[in-house]
């Protein structure tokens, strides 16, 4: 991904809102801290990148890995998709 496409992506994200006084006082709000901490921990645990914006918005980006296994079936003379257990 090029730098310009990353900038375009960030610029296309709707801007969050500051509180009525125009300050970012939410950063000291215990409820905000707890909620944002949970989102950030979960995203990092799943291997996502996290951007914590100045206005308090949190952006997570990641890629879902899909694993498909195929096995040669010598009787059918073809590759057969092997069903695997769902990720827990």
Image (spheres, grey):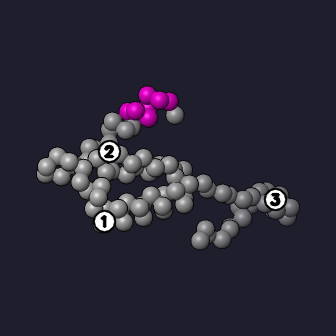
Measured as percent of width and height from the top left, residue 48 is found at 52, 52
**How far, Cα to Cα, is label 3 from label 2?**
53 Å
Disc 3 from disc 1: Cα separation: 56 Å
* Residue 14 position by quadrant: top left
> Dot 1, crowdedness within 10 Å: few (<14), some or many (≥20)?
few
Q: How packed is label 3: few (under 14 Cα within 10 Å), some, or many (20 or more)?
A: few
Compare marks 3 and 1 and give the one earlier in the sequence. Answer: 1
Residue 27 screen position, x and y as percent? 30, 55
Tag 3 secondary structure: strand
Do callouts 3 and 2 mark residues in contact (Cβ within 8 Å)? Answer: no
- Give the labeled residue for mark 1: 30
Q: Residue at x 39, y 37 (%)?
A: 9
**Magenta part of the chain:** 2-8
Residue 83: x, y in percent?
68, 67
Which of the numbered marks, if any, corresponds to residue 54?
2
> Eyeballing the image, is 86 above or below 65?
below
Number of callouts: 3
Instruction: Tell us which disc is closer to us: 3 or 1.
Output: 1
Judged left or right of residue 48, residue 68 is: right
Label 3, on which residue? 72
The CA distance from mark 2 to mark 1 is: 17 Å
């Amino acid at each position: 991904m090029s730098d310009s496409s990353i900038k375009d992506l960030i610029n296309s994200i709707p801007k969050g809102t500051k509180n009525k006084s125009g300050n970012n006082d939410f950063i000291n709000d215990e409820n905000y801290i707890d909620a944002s901490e949970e989102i950030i921990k979960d995203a990092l645990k799943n291997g996502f990148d996290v951007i914590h914006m100045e206005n308090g918005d949190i952006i997570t980006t990641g890629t879902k890995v899909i694993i498909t296994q195929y096995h040669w079936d010598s009787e059918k003379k073809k590759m057969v998709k092997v069903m695997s257990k769902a990720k827990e």
